[in-house]
Amino acid sequence: MKAFVVEQYGKDAALTEKDVTLDQTGNYDLKIKVEGTSLNPLDTKMFLGHVAAAPSTGILQGDVTGTVIETGKSVTSFSIGDHVIAFGGGLGNRSGALAEEMLVPEQMAVHRPEHLDVATAGCLPVISLTAMEVLKERAAVYPGMRLYVAGGTGGVGHLVGQLAKHYGCDVTASAANDEKATWLDEHGIRPHCYREESAEQLLKRLGHDGFDVIIDTVGGDHLQESFILAKERGKIISIATRTTQDLTPMHSKALTLEAVFVALPLLKGKEEEMLRQKKHLAEVVQLVADGVIDLVIEEHVSREIDALNAAYHLFDQRSHFGKVSITT
């Protein structure tokens, strides 16, 4: 089969189109004809050699939607011809979706609703699993919780804010410009135009002592702002912790800082956690299919070598409004 392969990860990495042979279908695997996928920060960081979890096969991208063309002998919940959505590979010893076919564990796949388009479906897995771990498992959200999302219109950010609002939270999120602020406001999320209003000014305007939970999807020096925005004994949950920071402000308020790495269950083969992620994905997929949650796709990248290489090298050089989709 045809695949786009990275032969050497690092700053000079490049995708090359090659003929490759997929591994034999395992007992609990689904072989999928790939129809759609999307680009995530995890993919680009592995591509550039920043995360030591890259697939040994050189075939990236864990997000996938497609049609089942073969099932392992122990598979019970899927059949040939089923349309599925999964986070199933692109790291460790599992090949990803930058190929004509992909193997995914049954434990990480859900059925794709008939009326959900391929581009949207292919963008959902990683951001859904990340958002749900943050909200359901780490933050333990409840109605009325005051929650702040740093990077409120990014891939994870625009989803986590909407989900938190759906679960009854009082949600504020950062916005870099008027377009993003308007989108947040239209979705019931209070925008914080951080370039015009400091964290201290925001808290003064809102008239409270800080947020119960800060969800940091940006990382870097934004973490210092999170320390200001969090209330005493509040919690900061970050999905971007490759940074060096002074933790003194965190200590002075007795804050909790947690890191989320959504790929850990798949990478380590933790079946119980994978099944929990499967439930999370199914819930978000249905909310999007029902129109309760909006999925923003800012760019559609063609499945061609030059376009893919450009997308990988440019991805981390700019902020994003939603997702980058790749379809066949």
Image (cartoon, rainbow, N blue to C red):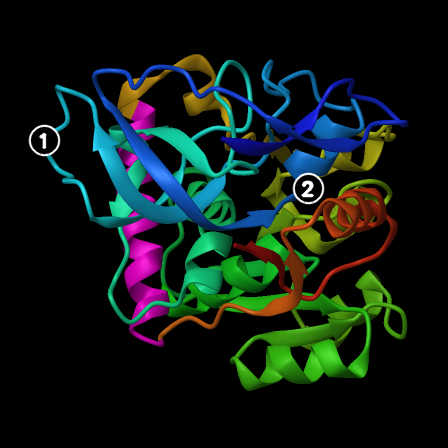
Mark 2 Cα within 10 Å, few/some/many (few <14, many 20+)? few
- Tell me which segment is drawn in magenta: 273-291
Q: Quadrant of residue 297?
A: bottom right
Query: Is residue 220 inside the magenta stretch?
Result: no
Vertical arrangement, residue 140 with respect to residue 246, above or below: below
Vertical arrangement, residue 118 with respect to residue 43, above or below: below
Q: Looking at the image, which residue is at 42% across and 23% down? A: 266
Counting residues from the N terminus, which is met first, the one under dot 2 or under dot 1? Answer: 2
Q: Residue 159 or 210: which is nearer the viewer?
A: 159
Q: What residue would you read off at disc 1?
A: 76
Vertical arrangement, residue 15 with respect to residue 299, above or below: above
Q: Would you say 217 lies left or right of 270 here?
A: right
x, y (%) of residue 177? 82, 76
Vertical arrangement, residue 3 with respect to residue 40, above or below: above
Q: Would you say 267 lies left or right of 45 here?
A: left
Q: Is residue 141 visible?
A: yes
Q: What residue would you read off at disc 2?
A: 41
Q: What amino acid does circle 2 point to?
A: Pro
Q: Would you say 324 lies left or right of 129 here?
A: right
x, y (%) of residue 148? 62, 59
